[in-house]
Image (tube, rainbow, N blue to C red):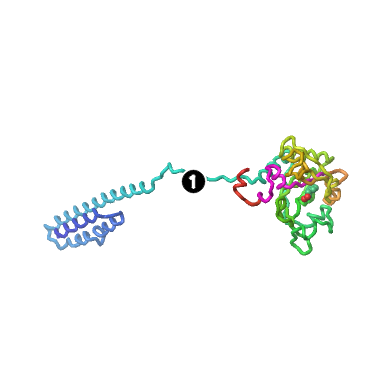
Amino acid sequence: MKKLLEEIKGASLAAVENAADLGALESIRINYLGKKGSLTAVLKQMGSLSAEERPLIGQLANDIRSKIEEAITQKAAELSEKLLEMRIISEKLDVTIPGTPVTIGKKHPMSIVLDEAIDIFTGMGFAVAEGPEVEFADYVFTKLNTAEGHPAREWQDTFYFTEDSSVLLRTQTSPVQVHVMETQKPPIRIISPGRVYRKDEVDATHSPMFHQIEGLVVDKGITMGDLKGTLNTLVQRLYGPDTKTRFRPHHFPFTEPSCEVDVQCFECRGEGCRVCKGEGWIELLGAGMVHPKVLEGCGIDTEVYSGFAFGVGLERMTMRRFKISDMRLLYENDIRFLSQF
Ligand code: PHE
């Protein structure tokens, strides 16, 4: 039995020495010291020994057990240290490697100009109102004094949703005027930026979808002078303090009188050039005094109140502001173009 114990000692210590990892070490412990381990099996046979032999063999077996345990503990410590070393090597962080650059996006030029315009108008006491892009013909046309038979209501100009032409993609932001006047009492001072849609072919100055900013002021004693002052403030803040405007008579069904407003050409300062097609002026917006029929249709007393309205194209404003000659550039999402602003 002594010989057997010595054999177990030799074999187990050699196995511990060669263990490759902590898992192998654990199976060695189970194989020798576990409930069904070989050392345990030997100890179970102690009963067959003589009374003199028993304490000697018992002593030897205990010594071997603690030797093996000691060897396992030591090897385990050695292996964990090696494991840690390997992790330190494999997880090494090289702080000198250049980082991956994060490219920061930029505001779209139209967003830049819209934010500037909102800033200018809110500075003059205007609030920002919103209205739907899918709209009733009643709001786009009828309530804006644009009766059946008006060319703007033609199928070839407009995206209708229904056979009876009662629902469409709005062709202008002016219906927001009606929504606001139906729900708010004067004094009213709002702008309303948003998308509008017309059946236009795409070219350098047209797109079937574009943006307008509508403006509406209704109060006691509002005159054409207030309209001129407001719009002059807008263009001078946008394009510089010496920017000149020109108000030309025009016609819109929902304003009376109506006008179109031009700004002096940024390229030639009024001399006439290729950009303004020899005119010296560039058309910017439509405006006028709100037609009494429109005010009254919204329940506003025209004996007490008057108002002005305007609608300005955001694409046009942006193209003037950054001297962009082709509107398509604003929609093509070419980073090389957009990152210039
Ligand atoms: N809605 C008009 C257009 O799209 C512009 C406009 C707005 C004119 C408000 C007068 C008053 O051309």
Compared across the picture, whether 45 is left or right of 120 comes to left
Q: Which residue is mark 1?
A: 100
Question: In this picture, is 32 found above or below 174?
Answer: below
The secondary structure type at the circle numbered 1 is: loop
Compared across the picture, whether 288 is left or right of 325 comes to right
- Relative image position of residue 202 (x, y in whole percent): 70, 55
Which residue is found at the position 19% from the left and 58% from the top?
Answer: 8
Residue extending farthest top: 242
The number of callouts visible is: 1
* Occupied quadrant, residue 44: bottom left
Of the pair 123 and 172, the residue shown nearer to us: 172
Q: In the rendered image, is residue 27 in sight?
A: yes
Of the pair 29 and 206, the residue shown nearer to us: 206
State the quadrant of the N terminus.
Answer: bottom left
Q: In the rendered image, is residue 124 in sight?
A: no
Compared across the picture, whether 162 is left or right of 7 comes to right
* Occupied quadrant, residue 46: bottom left
Q: Amino acid at mark 1?
A: Thr
Label 1 lies in ligand 1 vicinity (Cβ under 8 Å): no
Q: Which residues are magenta?
A: 307-330
Residue extending farthest bottom: 163
Of the pair 35 and 101, the residue shown nearer to us: 101
State the quadrant of the C terminus.
Answer: top right
* 279 inside magenta stretch: no
Question: In this picture, is 68 found above or below 238?
Answer: below
- Relative image position of residue 152 (x, y in whole percent): 80, 56
- Relative image position of residue 214 (x, y in whole percent): 75, 47
- Relative image position of residue 151 (x, y in whole percent): 82, 57
Of the pair 226 and 13, the residue shown nearer to us: 226
